[in-house]
Amino acid sequence: MRYFSASVFDRGLASLPDAKKKQVKKAIRLTTAFFETGHLPHGLGLTPLGRQIWEIRAGLNERILFRKNEDVVEFLLIGSHDEIRRFLKNL
């Protein structure tokens, strides 16, 4: 499996406070571990949103949107539930 992040994802991560960055990085670690081992960790909130788009939780308010296509995972966006909705409307 190969993992990438979009530039908007990188900018969003860089703008977060340290505590939230830590939560996001943990969620990403758990997600990559899931794709490598097949073991779904409790609390990740992995949700398919359709057409290769998935969402995971990184804390109470932050969501991470990613695209999975065969052996490639691309992290697309970090945001609130509403920000994720707006982004999906523009896809």
Image: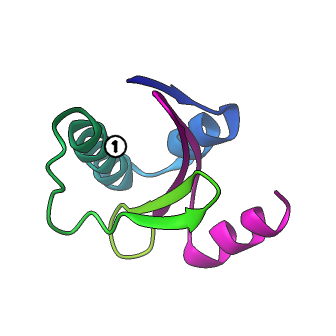
Viewer-closest of 12 and 31: 31
Residue range (magenta): 63-91
Residue 67: in magenta span:
yes
Residue 16: in magenta span:
no
Viewer-closest of 54 and 77: 54
Q: Is residue 33 left or right of residue 32?
A: left
Q: Position of residue 10 (x, y in %)?
A: 58, 35
Q: Is residue 79 left or right of residue 87?
A: left
Q: Position of residue 60 (x, y in %)?
A: 35, 76
Viewer-closest of 37 and 5: 37
Vertical order, 30 against 55 (above or below): above
Classed neighbour count for the residue bearing mark 1: other residues with Cα under 10 Å, few (<14), some (14–19), many (≥20): some
Can you name the residue that lies furthest to the top here? 2
Residue at 51%, 57% (x, y): give it. 54
Quadrant, the C terminus: bottom right
Q: Position of residue 52 (x, y in %)?
A: 59, 51
Vertical order, 1 against 15 (above or below): above
Instruction: Inspect the image, locate mark 1, and give the three-letter code of the amino acid beneath it.
Output: Ile
Vertical order, 74 against 43 (above or below): above
Q: Is residue 63 left or right of residue 32?
A: right
Residue at 37%, 47% (x, y): give it. 21
Can you name the residue that lies furthest to the right here? 90
Residue at 27%, 63% (x, y): give it. 44
Q: Which residue is mark 1?
A: 28
Residue at 68%, 31% (x, y): give it. 7
Can you name the residue that lies furthest to the front here? 70
Q: Is residue 45 left or right of residue 69?
A: left
Q: How is the image coloured?
A: rainbow
Quadrant, the N terminus: top left
Q: Position of residue 72 (x, y in %)?
A: 50, 28
Q: Give the structural element (helix, strand or loop) at label 1.
A: helix
